[in-house]
Amino acid sequence: MQSETLRYEMTCPINGKICKGGVRSDFEDQKKQCRLWTNVAGKDPQSEKVLDFFDCSWAWMPVVGLEQSQMTRQNTATMQDFRNETHDGFAAFGTAIKQAALAFNNLVEAQQALIEGVPLPAIENKENNGHEN
């Protein structure tokens, strides 16, 4: 971790005054530190380089924006994958429902034929692929 005592001068993005290590030149008490001066630790979203140092939080806005964009893209891709799987699941469910409805209609027709005394067509035995033993 970078030492907080390591200080450098920059121009404050808020009022344009000189800021040295989080202490602005317009502060009456030169021992008070700016609330925007913060330690940031993590990985740079562009280079994956490990970061751990103090800087003005306003200076981190572009980096935070890049990180947010990357997270949004990842979340969008994940949601698209979820949508595709859900769509495929509903399609399979719809096919199963259609098959069940068709089987039910066939059963109703068969019952109706039995009630009316109409002979039923031969039903192929699926277990032995239609072959006699």
Image: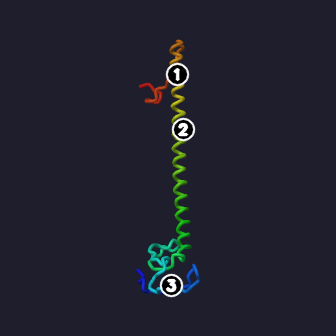
Residue indicated by mark 1: 108
Numbered disc 1: secondary structure: helix
Mark count: 3
Q: Which mark is residue 94?
A: 2
Mark 2 or mark 1, earlier in chain: 2
Q: Nearer the viewer, mark 3 or mark 2?
A: 3
- Residue nearest the viewer, comparing 67 with 117: 67
Numbered disc 3: secondary structure: loop
- Residue nearest the viewer, comparing 10 with 97: 10
Q: Amino acid at mark 3?
A: Phe
Residue indicated by mark 3: 27
Q: Amino acid at mark 2?
A: Gly
Mark 3 or mark 2, earlier in chain: 3
Q: CA distance from mark 3 to mark 2?
A: 69 Å
**Residue 13, position as x, y percentages in the image:** 57, 79
Badge 1: how crowded within 10 Å, few (<14), some, or many (20+)? Answer: few
Residue at the image position 51 percent from the left and 49 percent from the top: 85
Residue 120's place in the image compared with 8, above or below, is above
Residue at the image position 51 percent from the left and 21 percent from the top: 122
